Image (cartoon, helix red, strand yellow):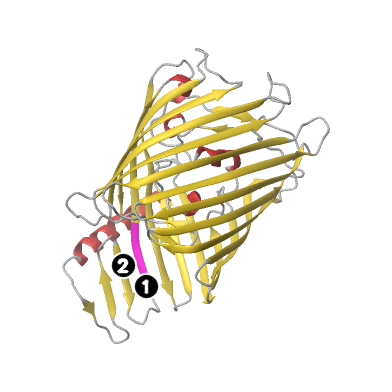
Amino acid sequence: MIRKHFAGFAASALALAVSAQAFAGTVTTDGADIVIKTKGGLEVGTTDKQFAFKVGGRLQADYSTFDGFYTVNGDKADAAYFRRAFLEIGGVAFTHWKYQFNYDFSHNAGSADDGYWDEASIQYSGFNPINIKMGRFDPDFGLEKATSSKWVTAQERTAAYDLVDWTNAHQNGLGIQVNGTFGPTLYGSAGLHAKDQNDEDGNSVKQMNLRGVFAPLNTAGNVLHLGVNYAKRNLDDTALDTRIRSRLGMRGVSTAGGNDAGTNGNRLVLAGANNQPVGSYDDDTAWGLEAAWAMGPLSIQGEYIKRDLDAADAAYQDIEAKGYYGQIAYTITGEARDYKLGRFDSIKPSNKQIGAWEVFYRYDYLEGEHDVVGLTPTSAVEAKVHNIGLNWYANENVKLSGVYVKTAVDNAVNSNAAGDDDGDGLVFRAQYAF
């Protein structure tokens, strides 16, 4: 029923956007003037900035092919799926109240039968420069996560995030966050979230997130960014899946919606086990460091992540994991990547005929340590992922990209039947964002 209502709304919004093309300039009313903009979606607002709304969205269609460790039998498999299919509605009411509703029709982050509320939030900005945000939204953790999925450099964010997948995902819960800027160079946020995972008494798991950013240089093509992150959740009296798993940059191995490799898809297990009983673990903490530098069309960035899951019972062992990535990107056509305090943004082509062309390389490293069956407690499962890619920003709405992914693993307990400890893959994406 929800999908039907949204489909009707999407069609109405599309018709309104098309019909709005016939209008230009300012539409006057008996109150404040109304300005309608149709470039990059439909945006309507009053000239006094008290009220506004915008209808937008993004469509990401992916195709990937892969072999080696990425499949159970080592043979080649492929996948074709919508990575994201968002309808986004946001706006301002009475100057200081902001709202954002993002619904994902792709099912990729939901289930095979349901869509997915990526965000449904209200924010009060009357205490400028401090904001208070409430509702469903992702916790603040990491530079790549702060950057929109539309404008991250590689198709998939760093595999190092798989070590701490709970830190920057709302998991169908709700939260409250205080964030703001302090002068032109400092950004900070503090959030408290209730996840949809419960303890044995029915109390939701609570999670705290802190993030701070110092960016003494923060304009496009002239960026120096330093950040720190901390997240903690308490798992007392909670049965849980402690597995740390990674697709190693290849989403097509296993997707929630669309075609994937099915039972032949292979995800690396770095640590942990499923169905751990109540009382086995308690505190789960994660730290993160982030840094970036950009000069003109060149940008360099990286993050380091460490996780500790403490055992509450002597029968279980602490789980430790760490990882990092380093990335270098260069826009061949000379454009600089936009930057807003705390995150990178889009590349806007300066030449409308040829668009903007960007090349990049990213190296991901992951390590997990635990008494997984088949390993001694001191053994560490390791993974290394190389990503080499090309992005074409045909215009401000269309982005076409391709990446070659090469992975190598050590001490994997779930090596495939062929005994492969490495794998190769290609991922292609067509994106339209408005």
Indicate left or right for 359 with 231 as reference.
left
CA separation in Å, label 2 and label 1? 7 Å
State the residue lying farthest toward the front.
295
Is residue 164 placed above or below 252 in the rendered structure?
below
Tell me the residue at 52%/27% (across/down): 267
Residue 97, x across and y down, in percent: 48, 73
Is residue 413 placed above or below 273 in the rendered structure?
above
How many residues crowd mark 2 within 10 Å: few (<14), some (14–19), many (20+)?
A: many
State the residue lying farthest toward the bottom.
30
Tell me the residue at 44%/46% (across/down): 115
Residue 222 quadrant: bottom left
Let me know if residue 276 appears in the view. yes
- Residue type pointed to by label 2: Glu
How many residues crowd mark 1 within 10 Å: few (<14), some (14–19), many (20+)?
A: many
- Residue type pointed to by label 1: Ala
State the residue lying farthest toward the right.
314
Residue under label 1: 52
Part of the protein shown in magenta = 52-56
Look at the numbered disc 2 and give the secondary structure of its residue.
strand
Is residue 269 placed above or below 342 in the rendered structure?
above
Mark 2–mark 1 contact, CB under 8 Å? yes
Residue under label 2: 43
